[in-house]
Amino acid sequence: MKVSNAMPETALKRDPIVPPGSCVYAIGDIHGRADLLEILHRKICEDAASRRAKRRVVVYLGDYIDRGSSSRQVIDLLLDRPLPGFEAIHLLGNHEDSLLRFLDDTVAGPPWLFYGGEATVASYGINPAAQLPAGEDPILRMQAELRRRLPPRHLEFLKGLKLMHVEGDYLFVHAGIRPGVPLDRQKPEDLLWIRREFLTSTIDHGRVVVHGHSISTWPENRANRIGIDTGAFASDRLTCLVLEGKARSFLQS
């Protein structure tokens, strides 16, 4: 596997570690690729079986839905077949946030649908191109259909997603953080959407930030951040970061 090892100017003052006795797996943006998630889950189980860590944690970095054809199936897989013996942490991505906003406000519909939401509504049995009676608002109709067809347990899952998670010297978040801003003052929109200011920052954030959201061909293994969104919906490569002690490694579908 190719991994970008270009190091920023400022590194952390010590080697980052995860809690003793723990092995942490972080999975990047899935985007409706239930097939790749199943493959990666098998590889994670095989990898974990070869390690001595008693505590196993899997952190999903958000963007489970949109773009790929199996958004509903991804959520079903996470709910029905969690990795046995693992603590599971599910983070919120900007695409899940957009879906939730659409359920409350049709104004959020067009941009969400354009950036991949049509694949999600189709996975719930809604035809985005269906012919409607004259004068009927297609966005309002789609909102009503999605409200009706979204299983209550899926809605509960989406509403329960976390914005961030910490394991030792690592911070897990969907998009990144605003450099120089304390964690307790970070804005949700930055945690879900930030790109340039975070990606180009060379400062020590206090913890190594593990994130998705910004696609790269291969994992970006930097001193102050690790990016693992490898564009699974188009590349067929869903990436998982593996952390144990001071060691970092990667698994891919």
Image (cartoon, helix red, strand yellow):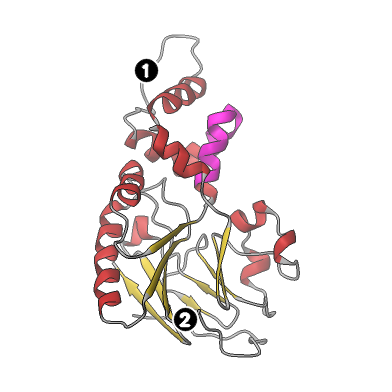
Q: Quadrant of the C terminus?
A: bottom left
Of badges 2 and 1, nearer the viewer stands 2
The residue tagged 1 is 131
Q: Nearer the viewer, residue 233 or 63?
A: 63
Counting from the top left corner in percent of width and height, residue 234 is at 35, 57
User: What is the x, y in percent for residue 251?
Assistant: 33, 74
Q: Quote the CA–CA distance across marks 2 and 1.
A: 48 Å
Visible in this render: residue 27? no
Q: Is residue 228 or residue 127 the one in the foreground?
A: 228
Instruction: Name which residue type carries label 1.
Output: Gln
Between 200 and 182, the one lying in front of the other is 182
Q: Secondary structure at mark 2?
A: loop
In the image, residue 212 above or below residue 150 = below
**Left of 201 or right of it: where is 42?**
left
| Dot 1 alpha-carbon crowd within 10 angstroms: few under 14, some 14 to 19, many 20 or more | few
Which quadrant holds the N terminus? bottom left
- Residue displayed at 52% across by 83% down: 17
Instruction: Pick whichever of labels 2 and 1 is earlier in the sequence.
Output: 2
Q: Is residue 29 visible?
A: yes
Disc 2 crowd rating (10 Å Cα; few below 14, some 14-19, many 20+) is some
Q: Residue at x 48, y 60 (%)?
A: 61
Magenta-drawn segment: 96-111
Instruction: Looking at this view, name the residue that lies furthest to the top.
Output: 134
Q: Position of residue 52 (x, y in %)?
A: 32, 83
Q: Is residue 174 left or right of residue 181?
A: left
Read off the residue under disc 2: 4
Q: Residue furthest bottom?
A: 14
For residue 79, above or below residue 132: below
Q: Residue at x 41, y 39 (%)?
A: 154
Residue 144 in the magenta stretch? The answer is: no
Callout 1: helix, strand or loop? loop
Q: Nearer the viewer, residue 208 or 232?
A: 208
